[in-house]
Amino acid sequence: MNAQLTPALANGDLDAFWMPFTANRQFKANPRLLAKASGMHYWTADGREILDAVAGLWCVNAGHGRREITEAVTKQLGTMEFAPTFQMGHPIAFELANRLAKLSPPGLDRVFFTNSGSESVDTALKIAIAYHRARGAGQRIRFIGREKGYHGVGFGGMSVGGMVNNRKFFGSSMVPGVDHLPHTLSIEHNAFSRGLPQWGAHLANELERLIALHDASTIAAVIVEPISGSAGVILPPIGYLRRLREICDKHDILLIFDEVITGFGRIGKPFAAQAFDVTPDLMTTAKGLTNGAIPMGAVFAHRKIYDAFMQGPENTIELFHGYTYSAHPVACAAALATLDVYAKEGLLSRAASLAAEWEDAVHSLRGLPHVIDVRNYGLIGALELEPRAGKPGARAFEVFLECFERGVMVRQTGDTIAMSPPLIVESKQIARMVETLAAAVRHIA
Ligand code: PXG
């Protein structure tokens, strides 16, 4: 018999919390409550052990309940729970920025702190526009995003994003002057590719078409995820990102990589920019930065961008942007402890050493009923299911529920099941994830 970890919720107790990105009524009719976490596992409120195949929500890269992080947070709370960073500073904010600068791709050694991925994205977009203005190119105000892109839920991120449901409910409340590249998901050409797909580098050339339409002189930046997570794990075709970089360089357009998911070791290097050897001008991060323990995000800017702002009288604020909690001391402490754990345990390269095993494991799902694609890179894997007729997403949602019943937490988006386990995952746990997913897919059929 499982021990109850938290008191059962009385009827109606679930009403007040308006849950994010959740079917509230469906959830509240049959809630899935998590009450405890350690290592690779959660425990439900009624004491069931759940293997975490998604690192919480792609963020708990070093596994749950890391003592080092808890201690650093506790110590910081006892020393100084808050300090402003507007016209003031505190030492560990600078220490953290320096540590991050050492991990970053070449040149991206200036760090602006935020509290989430959405804030990182909106910050990067604003920096891009203000950068061009600072250089006398104030007419460069357009952005190019990509279909199926997810860049968080702020007005900027929503506008450059390309997830239809995240946009259509909000009318015309979009940042003006945004256009979108085509997405790179092609099951027709690339189904069951192992790692990066061969077909599709030419899709980057669409950027030339959009530039011809809008004129380069009006475009501030192109923003893409090196690997899309939320849209269901969409990989860049071989050569695609490099081509985007070349076109941006040719037209003096900034390239922003949204590394909220790929950052901090998810694909075997600190950042995807390093894994793919393509360096953006701005890089947005969040999730893995504090191992999910305290909300925090960071925008990495190329030094040339920072330097462009450091002109004019020295007593003027160079960038009219920031958050009360930018570089919050408790978040800084959590991030520093997280980076220590990553370094001590080699976690930022661990996905590379597990990648082949992970690839074989997820591709063993090929051939199961209704599986129309399997995609993988680093420690990311996805299973694409054929939608039920007239009910998009229903089959994958049932698989997600079935996996949870069987003790494994995966993530469902549309008709995709995504997995992105903590980077501490062991072989037997990889096997368990895949076996459970296979059993769930067969059960649902
Ligand atoms: N950019 C990218 C690339 C993301 O994946 C954000 C920005 C926004 O981050 P915040 O911290 O504001 O949520 C994200 C977030 C999923 C899933 O199921 C993915 C995200 C969030 C929630 C669920 O794939 N990504």
Image (cartoon, helix red, strand yellow):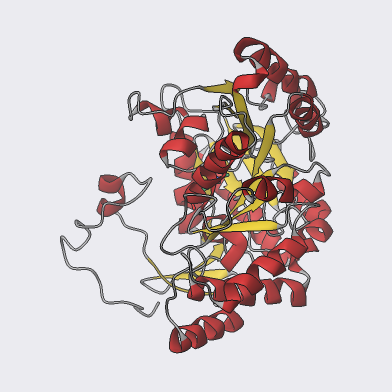
Given residues 211 and 366, the one toward you in this image is: 211
Residue 244 in view (yes/no): yes
Image position, residue 441 (x, y; %): 56, 43
Residue 102 image position (x, y, % from top left):
77, 64
* The one of 45 and 169 positioned closer to us in this rendering: 169
Residue 337: which quarter of the image?
bottom right
Residue 54 showing in the rendered view? no
Q: Residue at x 32, y 44 (%)?
A: 23
In the image, is 263 to the left or to the right of 121?
right
Q: Left or right: 354 with respect to 287?
A: right
The answer to which image quadrant residue 243 occupies is top right
Please state which of residues 384 and 256 is positioned toward the viewer in this rendering: 256
Q: Residue extending furthest front?
A: 313
Q: How many marks?
A: 0
Residue 164 in picture, x, y percent from top left = 45, 27
Quadrant holding the N terminus: bottom left
The residue lying at 48 percent from left, 66 percent from top is 87
Residue 385 placement, left or right of 400: right
What's the residue at 35%, 46% (across, down)?
22
Quadrant of res 344: bottom right
- Where 43 falls versus 194 (above or below)? below
The residue lying toward the viewer, choosing from 322 and 166, is 322
Q: Is residue 72 above or below residue 327?
A: below
Q: Residue 367 location, x and y as percent?
A: 70, 35
Residue lying at the far top in this picture: please name it. Answer: 213
Q: Residue at x 75, y 73 (%)?
A: 343
